[in-house]
Each structure stands twice: as structure tokens, then as C-alpha cells.
Image (cartoon, rainbow, N blue to C red):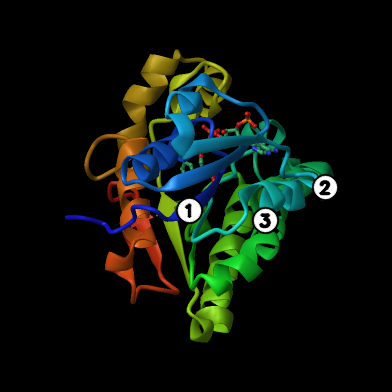
Amino acid sequence: MDLQLAGRTAVVTGASKGIGLAIVRTLATEGVRVTTAARNVTPQLAELGDAVTQVPVDLTTPAGADLLAARAGQTDILVNNLGGVTDDSMCAQGFLAIPDESWRQTFELNLFSTVRVTRALLPGLLERRGVVITISSIGARAAFQPVDYGTAKAALTNLSKALAEEFGGRGLRALTVSPGPTRTRNWTEADGYAGKLARVNGVTLDEFLAEVPARMGITTGRLTEPEETAALVAFLASPRAGNLTGADYIADGGVLKAV
Ligand SMILES: NC(=O)c1ccc[n+]([C@@H]2O[C@H](COP(=O)([O-])OP(=O)(O)OC[C@H]3O[C@@H](n4cnc5c(N)ncnc54)[C@H](OP(=O)(O)O)[C@@H]3O)[C@@H](O)[C@H]2O)c1
């Protein structure tokens, strides 16, 4: 299927690794010109040539979003992918162990960065009847630990719905994609979430990963690949999905059991 994305422009945040990198690759393959944001530039994005412009920027700073918007120019597609669990809250043993500073960092990284980037790009997105896709998490819908991450993601899902409602009449679409465990460095590298949790639990990373599908109830028995989530994002960003807005698309291999 031709997604009819060729010639469009996109901004992808948190784009140098993991799901963000896969989204940029997929969009670039579809002929989209992509401006990417991460603190560091990466050779993996440089390999994609002129289709990709890397903007090194820390989006947890108030000035970061305006810098990104100025470099991006007119944008059809915004993918708010930046987010994650902070080091401090990753291994916290429950709500009482998460101090204010960790809550603040988690909300800066996941929610406030997204608020600022979306606000900075929204005038141009409205002019072009664009689409905002925000990467939330299954943590937005269920009581997984750590609680600061889940609540920040729940806020993002709500924000996306509110954007869809407020600006839908002017042609903007807003959607969330909510991944479950996805094979990124957070699961595969020793310094990622899984590596840290493995150490806390006194097992190797391989032993920990072997138990993840059963422990988390992944119906398919495996982690989701970043490219699978990227394909969903590309479809949702495309005119093929032109009447989809205000919805949340779960990409979790069946972790969430409620309808
Ligand atoms: N992986 C999963 O299992 C999973 C599950 C559910 C939801 N998600 C969500 O999916 C999204 C992507 O997750 P991921 O695992 O692919 O992430 P990741 O591999 O940890 O990559 C994070 C990206 O964000 C960039 N970044 C980090 N801090 C930044 C900052 N302050 N300013 C600008 N860029 C920054 C990183 O590059 P630099 O270090 O160069 O800045 C990197 O490109 C997140 O929103 C996450 O919450 C992931």
C-alpha cells in the first residue's frame, strides 16, 4: 500500500535510538523529510542522507522546543516519542520511595517536553492540517511500576485526546500509540531498565529477559520490535488514516487484558 507520505515533513523527538530511530527510518523510507531531536547526533541517522536533519537539543530545557521548531520549519507530522523511566525511579520500591525530584524529572522528560514541543509546532501543524502522534505507554492504562512514569504517560494520553478535540475542527489529528515492552536498549543493554532490574533481582540480563513474557503476560511470548511500532506510526501519520483521531493504539503483544 502506498502510504502517500512522500514529500511530507516530520519532526520526531527522542530520535537517535530505539523506537524513535525506527520511526525516522520508516518515515524516511516512505519519502518523508524528517527533522530529528536528541541530545546527541548519531551516525545511524546520518546514514539516511539528506532526508534527515539532526538537531542536537535537550528537550527538558525550556528553550529546547523553540530551537527545534525554528530548525524544523513547516511540519506536517509531529511524533512526540521522547520519554522514558528515569534512573532514580527505575529501581524504586514503590510510591513511597520516589522523591519529589524524581517526579519532577519524570514529568519534564515525558510530559512537559511534549507540551512545549507541541505548542511550538502547533501553528504550523494547523496551517498544514497536520497530525500529532504521541508515544505513550501501556503504563498509562494499568498500575505498573514505577508510578511516576505511568502517571506521566496517562497525562500524555489525556493531552493527546484534548488536542484532538480542541483542534480537530481545524483539520489537526492527534493520536497516541501505547507500546508495551519493546526491544530497545532499555531491555537489551546492561545499563537499560532490564539490566538494572536484573541486578536488583540478582539474576543475569539473559535470565531476566527470558522471564519477561511470562512475568508481564505478553500473550505473543516476545517483546515487540521497534520497527513494528514504527510501521503503525507511519500508517497513522498517513492520509490513509485520515479519519482517525482522538484514539489510543496499543502495541503490546497482548499484555493488557481488559477490553
Ligand atoms: N522501550 C519500551 O519498552 C517502551 C515501552 C513503552 C513505551 N515506551 C516509550 O517509547 C518511547 C521511546 O522509548 P525507547 O525505549 O525507544 O527510548 P530510548 O531507546 O531510551 O531512546 C530515548 C531517546 O530520547 C533521546 N533523549 C533522551 N533524553 C533526551 C532529552 N532530554 N532531550 C532530547 N532527547 C533526549 C535519546 O537520545 P540522547 O541520549 O542522545 O538524548 C534517545 O534518542 C518513550 O516515550 C518511552 O516511554 C517504550
- Say if 31 sits above or below 47 in the image: below
- Say what amino acid the circle numbered 1 marks: Thr
Q: Quadrant of the N terminus?
A: bottom left
Q: Is residue 257 left or right of residue 202?
A: left
Q: Is residue 68 left or right of residue 135?
A: right
- Say what amino acid the circle numbered 2 marks: Asp
- Mark 1 or mark 2: which is in front? 1
How crowded pointer 3 is (Cα within 10 Å; few <14, some 14-19, many 20+) is rated as: many
- Mark 2 or mark 3: which is in front? 3
User: Does dot 1 land on a helix, a strand or a loop?
Assistant: strand
**161 and 54: which one is in front?**
54
What residue would you read off at disc 3?
A: 117
Identified at 53% across, 64% down, the residue is 157
- Say if 84 sits above or below 46 in the image: below
Contact (Cβ within 8 Å) of mark 1 with mark 2: no
What residue would you read off at disc 2?
A: 100
Identified at 50% across, 28% down, the residue is 186
Mark 1 and mark 3 lie on one chain; the one further toward the N terminus is 1
How crowded pointer 1 is (Cα within 10 Å; few <14, some 14-19, many 20+) is rated as: many
- Say if 204 sits above or below 57 in the image: above
Mark 1 and mark 2 lie on one chain; the one further toward the N terminus is 1
- Say if 95 sits above or below 132 in the image: above
- Mark 1 or mark 3: which is in front? 1
Identified at 56% across, 45% down, the residue is 145
Residue 120 visible somewhere in the drawing: yes
**40 and 99: which one is in front?**
40
What numbered label is drawn on residue 259? none
Q: Is ligand 1 closer than 8 angstroms to the Cβ of mark 3?
A: no
Contact (Cβ within 8 Å) of mark 1 with mark 3: no
User: Does dot 3 land on a helix, a strand or a loop?
Assistant: helix
Q: Position of residue 128 (x, y in %)?
A: 51, 70
